[in-house]
Image (cartoon, rainbow, N blue to C red):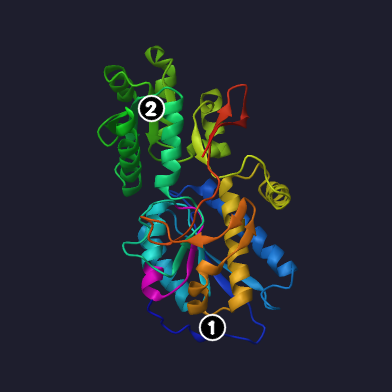
Amino acid sequence: MNTPPSPPAAERTDGSSVRIGALVPLSRPGWVEAGQHLLAGLELAVREVNDADGIVGRPLELVVRDTAADPQRAAAAVDELARLGVAALAGEYHSVVARAAAARADALGLPFLCSSAVLDALTEQPTEWIARLAPAQSHGWRIYADFLLGAGHSRIAVAAEPSVYWASGARILRDYLAPRGGTVIELDMHELAPTAVCDELVDNRATALLLLVGHPEPAVSIVKSVRRDQRLAEVMIGAPAGQPEFAEWATLLGDDSAAIPFLRYLPERLSPLGARVETALRERLGEAPSFVAFEGYDTVAVLADVLRSHGADRVRTAASWPRVAVEGTRGQIQFSRTPGISVWQWAWAPVQVVDRDPARPDRFRILHTG
């Protein structure tokens, strides 16, 4: 591991704050609601750390930068935050953005605990500087594929937009389902209008359609088109990337928002810590917190523990990933080297397949656990 020296700002012992840089999508085309939940979790945990004497008497400070789902903007933010002397980076929701941030953090020798992005190849080469809380895409999406097979779906269409993340998801599904008798039919949403998807589903005799596309569009338009087509009354719509998790989905789609299974990283039953944090997050957000809010909280819980134990030195922080043992809101968090994953990985956060209940779209049903 290359070990560039920490700048003086990260080493101060005069009672000034210990700073963490937070990367969060807070404007379009970023998924703003996800960013708001992520930030709520980060901020709640920082407040609790400071209420409990901070980092050995020094307050913990969050320095937030809006990535707007833009990889170049995120990389520039990493440069800026490094110059400001942050002890570590936290956050990011979008996988392609997190990949750009991780590459820059790795090059600069800046520890980065990635909260929510799942792309397996977060960095091109193995790195000591980056750790991740969210399950890798290959892990979660294979659990989703098991759910599809268990529900009787073997001819599965994916409506996909061009992106490293969506292409990776389609490949994981195809490679996992093919040996088990499943077929993945790829529909290029760069070429097809949402209404044309319906004819493709009929022609290919697909029993399930997965949305590997952006939110709200074209995801919302595709759902409306399929739901209105009587030929497709028996076709299941799925969204492994989690578009239906947030309230905006139900607002935009109403009754059509229900019965669309997606991946969620929560346990079946929250621990006392998780339940307490859920209450506080609900008060802060004015709505039920998503799993992304819990990821934000757990990120700061881990970083605070590391900073208390090893100080704000970047090299010592990065070296401490394999020794982390922190009780998070969703279980005991520890990092390890996982085959095929280039960063220190929590293996694994709990994984569920859930949907919105057709009888009450504001309530979730657990359909499958991994």
Give SS at disc 2.
strand
Q: Is residue 10 visible?
A: yes
The quadrant holding residue 236 is top left
Give SS at disc 1.
helix
Magenta-span inclusion, residue 237? no
Q: Which residues are magenta?
A: 104-117
Amino acid on which the number 2 mark rests in the picture: Leu
The quadrant holding residue 106 is bottom left
Q: Is residue 208 left or right of residue 64?
A: left
349 over 4 or under it: above or below? above
From the top left corner, tell me how far across and down residue 303 is, in percent.
58, 67
Most extreme residue toward the left, as rendered? 191
Most extreme residue toward the top, as rendered? 230
What crowding class fits label 1: few (fewer than 14 Cα within 10 Å), some (14-19), or many (20 or more)?
Answer: some
Between the C-alphas of marks 2 and 1, the distance is 51 Å
Disc number for residue 315 = none
From the top left corner, tell me how far across and down residue 85 is, in percent.
51, 78
315 over 181 or under it: above or below? below
Residue highlighted by disc 1? 9
Amino acid on which the number 1 mark rests in the picture: Ala
Q: What residue sits 59% from the left and 85% below the top?
A: 12
Please tell me how many numbered marks the rendered image carries: 2
